């Protein structure tokens, strides 16, 4: 579902590359944490997925789409296929909770009737029905993050990217948000979360990819199968470069499991 | 292989997207109108700056028209007076007038005999209610009054800067030289400075008016552009977020343009109202200073002209605000 193959990205003013020869593959329906300190390259990686940034080298394939061939005019359509959640929520301050969620559907040209049918269900999913007509400034941080998630999943994307979704929240509220993301994953959405919060990672016990100075230093499933750091207990692992995008693209189409259930009925 | 598959997937994505042009347009208008209300302080600021621009523009145009018309009127009034000995006959004056009219710069020639001048002097005294003067003239008698009154020829010219040929006629033509008043010199020399001043005012009114209008337009467009740019800067996060959610540029830009358009419409209507009110308050004062406002009064007599004026102001306001807003939004659309 998400493939990075030998991806390198440098910024002109930085001495070291933001991403250095990064390769990993996230299967459909997986739930993955991308961890690392500030400056490790997590945000750059997310920006590559949302096509805000282009790699200097390497290949990125998201949901069977090779980003090399996504032209500028295709970007809005491409972005509608992935849901993105931010640490600072990025809600429209002059629109109500309902309007913020509806916005994601309006830009896709959905009819008013469909929007009126869908938005209440999404708000119900994130437990925000009672604040639907409040403005973002008038609700709590946890509620704002739920609005952000509701907006991201309203179009039922196959991939949900969350950049430090618990970063601005207390532990308890953060756990609530993680449980909600787990629930979304249970419905068949592939979830990738960046974080440097150990509590968040330990709470769900999912696959963890660790970035340090732009390099993947460990890729560990709960069984340790995906360790790539040399301490892999003798399990034979394909080295970076094993991922052949051509093969992947074909496999992706054939093998990607469809979501088991619709998130919003 | 990758390219083919990606392209076909992108094509199907675009095909599957619901492209409802009218639905999108109505949403853009809806969010534009809502945004105008919810960002009311920014909207008010943009409207005020645009209104000031339009009022200044209107004032410059009106001032140019009024000054021009005043200068024309004053030019009309200016003539060169050539005085002849009392008793110069009408036939002689007509003959000299014919000579004078041959000059290309001469627009019109009028003349009055001594008797006619005496009549006019008496009438003027009566009109002004100067009874003592009327009594004195009656006492002297019109014949005697006429005998002391020089005959006058009034010459109107096209260009007040070139009077040499007229001076030449006055100084060299036999008839003129023979009958010129010895007591009163022709007035072209004493009027020349007034003529020059009025000419330069008229020139300033014409050329300066256009230059000022253009200058105001440029300055105010820059001011409005910066006002709107600052307003949009404070909402740049919104643009960023909308782009990330997958909104295309026209959907993001649209509501900003609708808001700008509304500012332009309100500014045009307010500027028109202020302009009319200001003109109605100032016009009587201007008239009292002998400034000719008839051209504006005549224009405003026709209700269609007033509608046209408002439409022009609204149109100009919309062009300025839409242009500024589009430029400002473009910067952020390009950035993200």
Image (cartoon, helix red, strand yellow):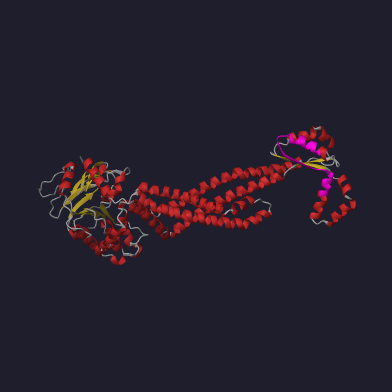
Residue A117 location, quadrant: bottom left
- Left or right, residue A217 beside residue B66: left
B233 over B202 or under it: above or below: below
In front: A259, or A140?
A259
Which residues are the magenta region? Answer: B93-119
Tell how many labels. 0
Residue A127 at x, y = what percent?
A: 26, 65
Residue at point 13% right, 51% down? A225
Residue B134 at x, y = what percent?
A: 85, 54
Residue at point 64% right, 44% down? B202
In front: B111, or A232?
B111
Residue farthest to the bottom, as pictured: A130
Residue A88 location, quadrant: bottom left
Residue B116 on the magenta span: yes
Quadrant into which the N terminus of chain B falls: top left
In front: B260, or B269?
B269
Residue B197 at x, y = what percent?
A: 68, 44
Regarding residue B102, the answer to whether it shows in the image is yes
Regarding residue A40, the answer to whether it shows in the image is no
Residue A164 at x, y = what percent?
A: 26, 56
């Amino acid at each position: 579902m998400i493939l990075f193959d030998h991806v390198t990205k440098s910024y002109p003013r930085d001495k070291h590359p933001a991403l250095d020869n990064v390769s990993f593959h996230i299967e459909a329906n997986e739930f993955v944490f991308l961890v690392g300190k500030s400056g490790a390259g997590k945000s750059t990686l997310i920006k590559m997925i949302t096509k805000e940034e282009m790699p200097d080298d390497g290949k990125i394939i998201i949901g069977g789409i090779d980003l090399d061939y996504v032209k500028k005019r295709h970007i809005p359509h491409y972005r509608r296929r992935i849901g993105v959640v931010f640490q600072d929520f990025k809600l429209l301050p002059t629109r109500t909770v309902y309007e913020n969620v509806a916005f994601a559907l309006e830009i896709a040209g959905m009819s008013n009737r469909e929007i009126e049918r869908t938005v209440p269900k999404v708000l119900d999913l994130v437990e925000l029905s009672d604040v639907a007509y409040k403005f973002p400034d008038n609700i709590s941080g946890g509620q704002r993050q739920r609005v952000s998630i509701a907006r991201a999943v309203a179009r039922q994307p196959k991939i949900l990217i969350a950049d430090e979704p618990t970063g601005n929240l207390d532990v308890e509220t953060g756990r609530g948000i993680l449980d909600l993301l787990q629930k979304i994953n249970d419905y068949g959405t592939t979830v990738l979360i960046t974080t440097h919060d150990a509590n968040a990672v330990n709470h769900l016990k999912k696959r963890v990819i660790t970035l340090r100075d732009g390099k993947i230093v460990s890729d560990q499933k709960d069984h340790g199968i995906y360790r790539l750091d040399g301490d892999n207990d003798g399990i034979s692992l394909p080295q970076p470069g094993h991922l052949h995008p051509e093969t992947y693209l074909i496999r992706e189409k054939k093998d990607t499991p469809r979501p088991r259930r619709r998130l919003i009925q | 292989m990758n390219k083919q598959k990606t392209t076909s997937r992108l094509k199907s994505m675009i095909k599957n997207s619901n492209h409802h042009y009218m639905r999108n347009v109505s949403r853009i208008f809806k969010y534009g109108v809502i945004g105008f209300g919810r960002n009311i302080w920014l909207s008010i600021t943009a409207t005020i700056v645009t209104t000031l621009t339009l009022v200044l523009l209107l004032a410059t145009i009106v001032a140019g028209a009024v000054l021009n018309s005043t200068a024309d009127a004053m030019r009309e009034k200016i003539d060169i007076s050539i005085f002849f000995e009392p008793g110069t006959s009408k036939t002689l004056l007509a003959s000299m007038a014919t000579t004078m009219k041959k000059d290309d710069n001469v627009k019109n020639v009028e003349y009055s005999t001594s008797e006619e001048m005496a009549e006019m002097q008496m009438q003027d005294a009566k009109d002004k209610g100067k009874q003592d003067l009327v009594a004195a003239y009656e006492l002297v008698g019109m014949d005697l009054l006429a005998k002391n009154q020089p005959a006058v020829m009034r010459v109107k010219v096209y260009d007040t800067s070139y009077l040499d040929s007229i001076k030449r006629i006055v100084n060299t033509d036999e008839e003129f030289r023979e009958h010129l008043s010895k007591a009163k010199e022709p007035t072209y020399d004493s009027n020349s400075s007034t003529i020059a001043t009025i000419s330069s005012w008229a020139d300033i009114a014409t050329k300066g008016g256009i230059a000022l209008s253009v200058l105001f337009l440029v300055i105010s467009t820059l001011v409005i552009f910066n006002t709107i740019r600052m307003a949009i800067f404070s909402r740049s996060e919104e643009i960023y977020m909308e782009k990330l959610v997958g909104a295309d540029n026209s959907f993001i830009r649209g509501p900003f343009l609708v808001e700008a358009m509304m500012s332009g419409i309100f500014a045009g209507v307010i500027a028109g109202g202020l302009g009319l009110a200001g003109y109605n308050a100032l016009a009587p004062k201007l008239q009292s200073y002998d400034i000719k406002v008839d051209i504006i009064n005549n224009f405003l007599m026709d209700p269609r002209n007033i509608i046209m004026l408002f439409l022009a102001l609204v149109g100009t306001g919309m062009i300025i605000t839409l242009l500024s807003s589009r430029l400002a939004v473009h910067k952020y659309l390009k950035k993200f």
